[in-house]
Image (spheres, helix red, strand yellow):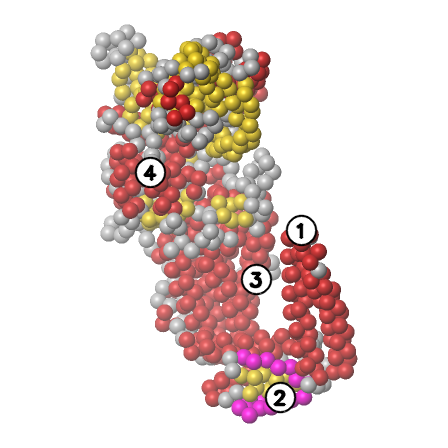
C-alpha cells in the first residue's frame, strides 16, 4: 500500500483527481427508463465573466446537490452553458475597437457581430475552466450557449408564437434608456440609488390672470425636462387650484402655451401640489398624457443631448442644459427657490450611467396573462421557494407586473425576427429569414433591434433540452429538480423562466428554488473588483485549495440572506482538511499488508458510540441536504470528523491497535468502515481530498467503486443507533475533559499520573470502573476510587458532572504554597483592574460623554475580569482546602 504524503497538498491532488473524473466520463448524463432523474440548470454565466464569490457559493451548492444525488444512484444532469450577455459583450468589443480608434459604426454590423463571436471564442471558456478548478461536476461534454443555432431557433419560435397570440406588440411607451449603451432597458435592469438632489420651484405664468392669480408654482427635480412640458396638472379635489383648471399657462423660456388639467394622480402634498407634465420623459406623466389627450414632446436625443424641440438649448448635454435652464429662470425671475431633496435615481445595471426615461417605439410583451398561471403554481406549492419568505416578494412583483420591453438597440444578440417590406410597407414575423415580401415580392429589411438577453435566458431549462423539438432529453429531464440562484435575478430570470416554462413546455421549469445568500465583504459591502472590495475565488483556491474554499463557504451559509465573508473560515477549513488527512494517514499506517477487510464489529462502548454517531451524522446530512440547510450539514460534518472521530475515537483505538491480534483487526475494520462512510458523506462538499483518501482505503469488495463520486451513498446505518452507548461515552468524555482541564489549570506535567476520586454509585460507578482504561489512556488517571460515600480529600480540585462529584488531589502534584501565592497575586491584580473599570463605569460623566462603543467595550472588559476573578477564587479555594 502506497504511503500517504506527510502533508496534504491541494495543488498536487486536485489536478490529477479532476483529470481522472473527466476521463471516467462520470459527469455525463444518462436516460434510465423508470427512474426519476435529478436535474439542475446552471444559471448561465456571462461569456464576459470570470468567477466571483457569488458564483463560487452558488456552484458549490449545485455541486453538493448533484454529487449527492449521483451517489444515491439517481440519473443526474447538470446543464452547463454560458449566456451571450448582449450589453456586456457589446461593451467589451466596443472598448477593444475604441482602443484602435474605431467605433462599431466604422466596421459595420456584420463585421461587429463577427468580432463578438471572436471575442466569445477567445474568452467564453474562461469561466467554464474555472468551474472545473472548483471541482464542479457539470457535463462539460454538453455545453450550451444562448446564441447556438438550435437555441436561436427556440428564441425565434417563442417570439413568433407570442406575436401570433397577441402577447407581443410594438408601441410607443416610456422606456428606460441608457445613453451610454444606447439601448432600452427593462424596469428590473435599472438599479436605483438614493442621491442628494434638489427641488426647484418655478413660476409658470398664466396666459391670463384668474381671480387675481398671475402664475402657478411647480416643483421639479429635473428643470431641464420642462422643455418638454405639455401641461400642468393639479388634483381635481384641490380647492387651491379649482379655478385654474382649464386655464392656459405659458411655458417659461420657450413661450409654448400649455393647459392646466385636473388628474387624480397628482399628490397634493408634494411640492406645491401643481405638477409639470412631461409625457415623453416620465412614465407617470406619460399615463397622465394618455388620459388627458396631451401631445408628447421628446426633448432629448439618444445620447441625452437636447433635441431640436429644446429650442435654444439644442445640442447641450442634459446636465449642461439643466445649468443653463436654471440660470435663465433665475435671470427672468422665474425661479422661486431651491430646496435640498434626496431622491432615488435609476442607473444602468451594466455601465451605471444615469437612466433617461424616454419615449420610444419598442417591442413589448403583455405579461399579465403569463403571470397568472405562474402565480398559481407557487401558491399551490408546485414551485417552492427556499427560504419560503421569498414567495411573498415574488407574489408582490408578479401581481403588479408591467409589460416587458424586450427590444434592445444593440447589434450583438438575437435579432428580432420581424421583416419590413421596402415596397409595400407590410410587416412579416417569421421563424426563418425572409428574403422577399410574400405580399408583393419586394425587398425586405429585418428589424435592427435585438431581444433583451433575459428573453433568451428565460427559455434555458427547456431550450437546452432540445425544445421546440420533442427530444428524449426534454421528455425525461424536464421539469428540472432544483434551481439555485441569487435574489437579484428573481424577477429578471426566475419568474420569467416559470412563465415561459408553463407557456411553452407545458409545465413548471423546476420544483424548488433556492435563493442563496448574497456574499458581502467583511465590512458588509457589496463585493466589487473595480471598487477594490472583491475577493477572487481563484486566489482563494491557490491559497487554501478548492475544497477549503467550498467548505468554508458552506460553513458560512445560514438561513439569513447575507454573508459577511470571513476568510478565517477558509483557514479553518484548510486546517480541517489537514486534520482529516493526518487522521486518515494514521489509520492507513495502522492497516498493514496482513489486514483482511471485513464488516464493522462492536466490541467496546467506544465502538458502539462511534457507529451510533455515524448513524446520526448520516441522518443529519440526509435531512439537511433535502431541506437545503448547507450550513448545518457542514457544521455536523466538521464536528464529527474533528472531534468525535479524530480527537476521541482514534485516541480510544490506539490501545487496541497496539494490542495486536483479534482486537487489533476488529478496531482496524471499524476505523476503515467509519472513515469510508464519513468520507462519502463529506464528498459532495469536499470532493478532491475525500476522493484521494477514499481510493487508498482497503475496502471489502462490495464497497468498492471506480471513484468515490459514483460510490454508493451511505444508507441503512440506523441499525447502529445506540443511545445507551452515546450516554455512556458522553459521561466518559466529560470526566476525561474535566481531568484534563485540572491538569492544564494547575500546569500538571502531561506524563505525571493523577488520582481521581468520584462520588457516584449505581450505573455511573459501574461505567467508570468498567472503562477505567479510557481514563488511564486519555487522562493519565493512575488511581481511581469510585464510592457513593466519597469525601473530598484535602487540597483537591472539584468538579460536578451529571450528579457525580469529581475530586482530584493536588498534594504532590503542585507546590501548594507556591501555587497559592501565584494565584493570590494574579487574583489581586485582576481585582485591582476590576475595581478600576467598575469605578469608570460608575462615573456618570464618563458614561454620558464617552462614545457608546467605548462604554460597551468597558462593560465587556468588566464582565471578562469578573469571570476571571471568579475562576481564580475557586482555584485558590481548591488549593487551600
Q: Which of the marked residues, 2 or 1, is nearer the chain's N terminus? A: 2
Q: CA distance from mark 4 to mark 3?
A: 50 Å
Q: Quadrant of residue 273?
A: top left
The circle on residue 579 is: 3
Q: Nearer the viewer, mark 1 or mark 3?
A: 1
The reply to whether dot 1 and dot 3 touch (C-beta < 8 Å) is: no
Res 621 seen here: yes
As drawn, 754 above or below 703: below
Evaluate if marks 2 and 3 touch, with contact meaning CB atoms under 8 Å apart: no
What numbered label is drawn on residue 851?
Answer: 1
Task: Decide: few, some or many residues near mark 2? Use Cα within 10 Å; few <14, some 14-19, many ≥20.
Answer: some
Tell me where the magenta segment starts and ends, as one range: 782-801
Q: What kind of element bears circle 2?
A: loop
Q: Which residue is rendered at x = 51% and y = 69% of the image?
A: 644
Q: Earlier in the sequence, mark 1 or mark 3?
A: 3
Q: Which residue is mark 2?
A: 792
Q: Is residue 791 magenta?
A: yes
Amino acid at each position: 500500500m502506497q504511503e500517504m504524503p506527510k502533508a496534504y497538498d491541494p495543488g498536487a491532488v486536485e489536478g490529477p483527481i479532476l483529470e481522472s473524473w473527466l476521463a471516467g466520463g462520470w459527469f455525463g448524463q444518462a436516460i434510465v427508463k423508470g427512474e426519476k432523474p435529478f436535474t439542475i440548470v446552471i444559471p448561465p454565466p456571462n461569456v464576459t465573466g470570470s468567477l466571483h464569490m457569488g458564483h463560487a457559493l452558488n456552484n458549490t451548492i449545485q455541486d453538493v446537490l448533484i454529487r449527492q444525488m449521483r451517489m444515491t444512484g439517481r440519473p443526474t444532469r447538470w446543464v452547463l452553458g454560458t449566456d451571450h450577455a448582449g450589453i456586456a459583450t457589446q461593451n467589451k468589443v466596443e472598448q477593444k475597437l475604441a482602443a484602435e480608434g474605431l467605433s462599431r459604426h466604422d466596421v459595420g454590423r456584420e463585421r461587429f457581430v463577427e468580432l463578438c463571436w471572436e471575442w466569445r471564442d477567445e474568452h467564453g471558456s474562461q469561466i467554464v475552466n474555472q468551474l472545473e478548478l472548483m471541482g464542479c461536476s457539470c457535463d462539460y461534454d454538453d455545453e450550451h450557449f444562448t446564441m447556438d443555432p438550435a437555441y436561436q431557433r427556440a428564441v425565434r419560435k417563442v417570439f413568433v408564437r407570442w406575436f401570433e397570440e397577441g402577447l407581443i406588440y410594438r408601441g410607443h411607451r416610456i422606456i428606460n434608456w441608457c445613453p451610454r449603451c444606447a439601448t432600452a432597458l427593462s424596469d428590473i435592469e435599472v438599479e436605483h440609488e438614493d442621491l442628494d438632489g434638489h427641488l426647484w420651484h418655478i413660476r409658470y405664468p398664466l396666459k391670463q390672470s384668474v381671480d387675481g392669480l398671475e402664475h402657478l408654482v411647480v416643483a421639479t427635480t429635473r428643470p431641464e425636462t420642462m422643455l418638454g412640458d405639455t401641461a400642468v396638472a393639479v388634483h381635481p379635489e384641490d380647492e387651491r387650484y379649482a379655478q385654474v383648471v382649464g386655464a392656459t399657462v405659458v411655458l417659461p423660456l420657450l413661450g409654448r402655451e400649455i393647459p392646466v388639467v385636473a388628474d387624480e394622480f397628482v399628490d397634493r402634498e408634494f411640492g406645491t401640489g401643481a405638477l409639470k407634465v412631461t409625457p415623453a420623459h416620465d412614465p407617470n406623466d406619460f399615463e397622465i398624457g394618455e388620459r388627458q389627450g396631451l401631445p408628447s414632446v421628446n426633448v432629448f436625443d439618444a445620447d441625452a443631448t437636447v433635441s431640436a424641440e429644446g429650442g435654444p438649448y439644442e445640442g447641450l448635454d442634459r446636465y449642461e442644459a439643466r445649468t443653463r435652464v436654471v440660470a435663465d429662470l433665475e435671470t427672468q425671475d422665474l425661479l422661486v427657490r431651491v430646496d435640498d431633496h434626496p431622491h432615488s435615481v435609476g442607473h444602468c445595471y451594466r455601465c451605471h450611467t444615469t437612466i433617461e426615461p424616454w419615449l420610444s417605439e419598442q417591442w413589448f410583451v403583455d405579461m399579465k396573462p403569463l403571470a397568472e398561471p405562474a402565480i398559481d403554481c407557487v401558491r399551490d406549492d408546485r414551485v417552492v421557494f427556499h427560504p419560503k419568505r421569498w414567495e411573498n416578494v415574488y407574489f408582490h412583483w408578479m401581481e403588479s407586473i408591467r409589460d416587458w420591453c424586450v427590444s434592445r438597440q444593440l447589434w450583438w444578440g438575437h435579432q428580432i425576427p420581424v421583416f419590413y417590406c421596402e415596397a409595400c410597407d407590410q410587416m412579416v414575423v417569421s421563424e426563418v429569414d425572409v428574403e422577399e415580401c410574400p405580399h408583393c415580392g419586394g425587398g425586405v429589411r429585418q428589424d435592427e433591434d435585438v431581444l433583451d438577453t433575459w428573453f433568451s435566458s428565460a427559455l434555458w431549462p427547456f431550450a437546452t433540452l432540445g425544445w421546440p423539438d420533442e427530444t428524449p432529453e426534454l421528455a425525461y429531464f424536464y421539469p428540472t429538480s432544483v434551481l439555485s440562484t441569487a435574489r437579484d435575478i428573481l424577477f429578471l430570470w426566475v419568474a420569467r423562466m416559470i412563465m415561459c416554462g408553463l407557456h411553452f413546455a407545458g409545465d413548471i421549469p423546476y420544483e424548488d428554488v433556492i435563493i442563496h445568500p448574497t456574499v458581502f465583504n467583511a465590512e458588509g459591502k457589496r463585493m466589487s473588483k473595480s471598487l477594490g472590495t472583491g475577493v477572487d475565488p481563484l486566489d482563494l483556491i491557490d491559497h487554501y485549495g478548492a475544497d477549503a474554499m467550498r467548505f468554508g463557504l458552506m460553513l458560512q451559509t445560514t438561513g439569513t440572506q447575507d454573508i459577511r465573508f470571513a476568510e478565517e473560515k477558509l483557514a479553518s477549513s484548510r486546517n480541517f482538511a489537514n486534520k482529516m488527512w493526518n487522521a486518515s494517514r494514521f489509520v492507513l499506517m495502522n492497516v498493514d499488508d496482513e489486514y483482511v477487510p471485513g464488516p464493522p464489529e462492536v466490541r467496546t462502548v467506544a465502538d458502539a458510540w462511534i457507529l451510533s454517531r455515524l448513524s446520526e451524522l448520516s441522518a443529519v446530512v440526509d435531512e439537511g441536504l433535502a431541506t437545503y440547510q448547507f450550513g448545518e450539514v457542514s457544521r455536523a460534518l466538521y464536528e464529527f470528523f474533528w472531534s468525535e472521530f479524530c480527537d476521541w475515537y482514534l485516541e480510544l483505538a490506539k490501545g487496541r491497535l497496539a494490542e495486536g491480534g483479534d482486537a487489533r483487526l476488529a478496531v482496524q475494520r471499524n476505523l476503515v468502515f467509519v472513515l469510508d462512510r464519513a468520507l462519502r458523506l463529506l464528498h459532495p462538499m469536499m470532493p478532491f481530498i475525500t476522493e484521494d483518501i477514499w481510493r487508498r482505503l482497503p475496502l471489502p469488495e462490495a464497497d468498492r467503486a471506480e471513484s468515490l463520486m459514483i460510490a454508493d451513498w451511505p444508507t441503512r446505518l440506523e441499525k447502529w443507533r445506540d443511545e445507551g452507548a452515546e450516554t455512556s461515552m458522553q459521561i466518559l468524555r466529560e470526566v476525561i475533559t474535566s481531568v484534563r482541564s485540572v491538569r492544564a489549570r494547575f500546569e500538571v506535567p502531561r506524563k505525571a499520573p493523577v488520582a481521581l476520586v468520584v462520588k457516584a454509585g449505581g450505573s455511573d460507578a459501574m461505567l467508570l470502573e468498567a472503562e477505567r482504561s479510557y481514563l488511564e489512556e486519555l487522562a493519565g488517571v493512575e488511581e481511581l476510587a469510585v464510592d457513593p460515600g466519597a469525601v473530598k480529600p484535602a487540597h483537591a480540585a472539584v468538579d460536578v458532572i451529571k450528579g457525580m462529584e469529581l475530586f482530584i488531589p493536588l498534594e504532590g502534584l503542585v507546590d501548594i504554597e507556591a501555587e497559592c501565592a501565584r494565584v493570590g497575586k494574579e487574583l489581586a491584580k485582576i481585582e485591582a483592574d476590576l475595581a478600576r473599570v467598575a469605578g469608570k463605569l460608575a462615573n456618570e460623566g464618563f458614561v454620558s460623554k464617552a462614545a457608546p462603543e467605548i462604554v460597551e467595550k468597558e462593560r465587556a472588559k468588566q464582565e471578562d475580569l469578573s469571570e476571571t476573578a471568579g475562576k481564580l477564587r475557586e482555584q485558590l479555594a481548591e488549593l487551600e482546602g
